[in-house]
Amino acid sequence: MKETTFISQNEAKWARFEQLYANNKSHPGELSDLYFDLTNDLSYSQTFYHRRTVRAYLNQLAQAVFTTVHNTRRPSAGGVFHFWFKRLPMEIYQTRANIQLALISFLLYAAIGVLAAHFIPHFVEAILGEGYVVQTMENIKRGNPLGIYDSSSQFDMFVMIASNNLKVAFIMFSAGYFMTLGTHYFLFANGVMIGAFQYLFYSQGLLETSFLGIWMHGAFEVSAIVIAAGAGITAGKGWMFPSSYSRFEAFQLATKRAVKIMVSLVPFILLAAFIESYVTHHYDVLPAWSKWVLILGSFGIILFFYFLFPLFASQKFEPIPEAIVRPKRVGHTKLNVYKIRTAAELITDAFSLYRSGFADLGKVMFGIFLPCGLVLISAQALIYGGPEGLDANLAWYDYVLNMFGISKESPPQLILYGCWTLLFSLVFAAVGHSLLKQIGSNDGKSQMSFIIKKTPWFWLGSIGLWVFLLIPWQSLIFTVFLFPCVTYQGPLLGLDKRGFGVKLNLTANYFFVNWKPMFGAMVVLVVFLFILLQPIAGILSFTFTPGEVIMPDLLDHMAQNVQNIASGLGKNPDFYAALARKFVYLLVLLFLIPYLGFLFLLNYYNILEIRELTSLKQALELFGNRNKAREGEVK
């Protein structure tokens, strides 16, 4: 059936459904019948018109009804019971593998802490802090090994402990969005710390005393941290491995599931803080049997609520459907690069190309860029910093300049910077090959042969960009508006097939073409990166005085831990903390540079379309040759 016939036969019925749905208190029987017909029409349109507007229109109507039924029902008196004893256990069951992974990882990290404390001198001091260890040893000599819990009032301890544990659980969860690496880092830090802590008391013959004192509250506290890590892994894996969902849909579902698990942890975290403040505070007068009952009972509650009951619920209750109505997937369509794009279109189309081509770029980014970047970071640190020459109190921009070798003016530093520019040009060439492959315009060359041939041209064409990056950051406010003008020359020299003299002439003629959309896209990208990266390595993390961080981020905490470990091992803490920071910056570049490459390439094609009307010329060449059997397809 033709689409126009399908619409004409049913549009009156659809209009009647919209009218009745808007006034849903009347004609419920007719509305129900029309909804049944609507879903049948939707199925038909998904089969025969899945790329047409009618399919989207019918899906929107059906989705509105679905959302109303499932999301706007009045909460019943048993809503809380339903959440805690049906919905939540089913969600936990769906994430059981991630929680188990977090538990196994934590136990492994704790074992590492025990072994390191046993074999490495002063490791305990490096992890727990020398002041804490000294105070604990003094308490042991006085016969009160856990006397640190007597150091403040019970209510003050409760408020401090509860807020700190809630913060730790939230960080453990939110760090999962960084490919779950952030969650594993904090899980590692906490696991090693607990292992070292228990070994400290074991070395003094007080393992049982410390176990009975610490794990009265630690059963709930540590369990909550591990389960929060499982929620973080769930959130991170949601957008990393979307399965049959789109990446955004998978991100939504994983976040909702993880947030519900985090909500369930709040009572246990508060209960752990209460026990630590009001019970552990009097550990020395409690009989041993009461401590064992409290510890085993606490672990039993966690085991039942997060492992046994979800298993029981999965066998008793039907799976709860996801509250997302997804349209039928359509096939991948080639992106038309010859198009005049706005700033928003530049950003979204560059991301679409980046998402489609990143798997193809993986061999270059992880096989060439990452190893070479590590070599450059290590060479720069050893040659120009040395184990005694790096300062851990630098601002973030000083670290970046130091990393690229442009913080000094000696020729070897410029050679280092030149190596970085060659590495970036190699990535741009790989991005160019990926784009040509995605739009079906590849000249048949393999990826490596294309990269070898084109990298020098991308490097030569990007000289303006390399010079721009040498401008002191304090002067950027006066020169930043020129940045869009130095982004298209690399793609022009790398991809244009005309003669070198022609390309040089075009470089001058295109200088301010498409300046406004590209500048707008760069502003939006900078703001987005500022918001995204601030929690882990943001630009607001800086110092006014040595050792005083105004707004610390996750990277500051990581660097502090590296400093503590290096200091305990007798190594220069600033040197290794600086290396750790630069490694994180390298990981950011690993994912950022390819996206910039796609953005620069689309800007180049924008300019070609504006000046040379490439798409119009192609349309004129195809005029009269269109296949009428395919004229209904969406282009």
Image: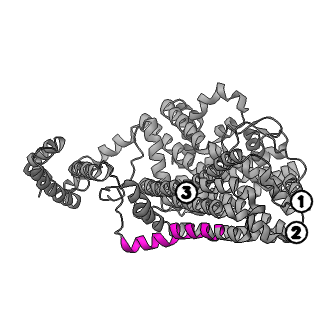
x and y percentages locating residue 188 in the rendered image: 70, 62
Tag 2 secondary structure: loop
Residue span colored magenta = 294-316
Side of 312 where 60 appears, left or right: left
Q: Quadrant of the N terminus?
A: bottom left
Residue drawn where x is 89% and y is 47% of the image? 389
Taking the image as shown, residue 216 lies to the left or right of residue 140, namely left
Secondary structure found at label 3: helix
Q: Is residue 501 visible?
A: no
Q: In this rendering, does residue 511 appear at all?
A: yes
Disc 3 residue type?
Answer: Leu
Magenta stretch secondary structure, dominant: helix
Mark 1 and mark 2: Cα distance apart in space = 9 Å
The answer to if 631 sits in the magenta stretch is no
The residue labelled by disc 1 is: 137
Mark 1–mark 2 CB contact (< 8 Å):
yes
- Nearest the eye: 372 or 154: 154
Q: Earlier in the sequence, mark 3 or mark 1?
A: 1
- Residue, disc 3: 265
Q: Earlier in the sequence, mark 1 or mark 2?
A: 1
**Dot 1 amino acid type:** Met
**Residue at 60% across, 69% down:** 297
The residue tagged 2 is 204
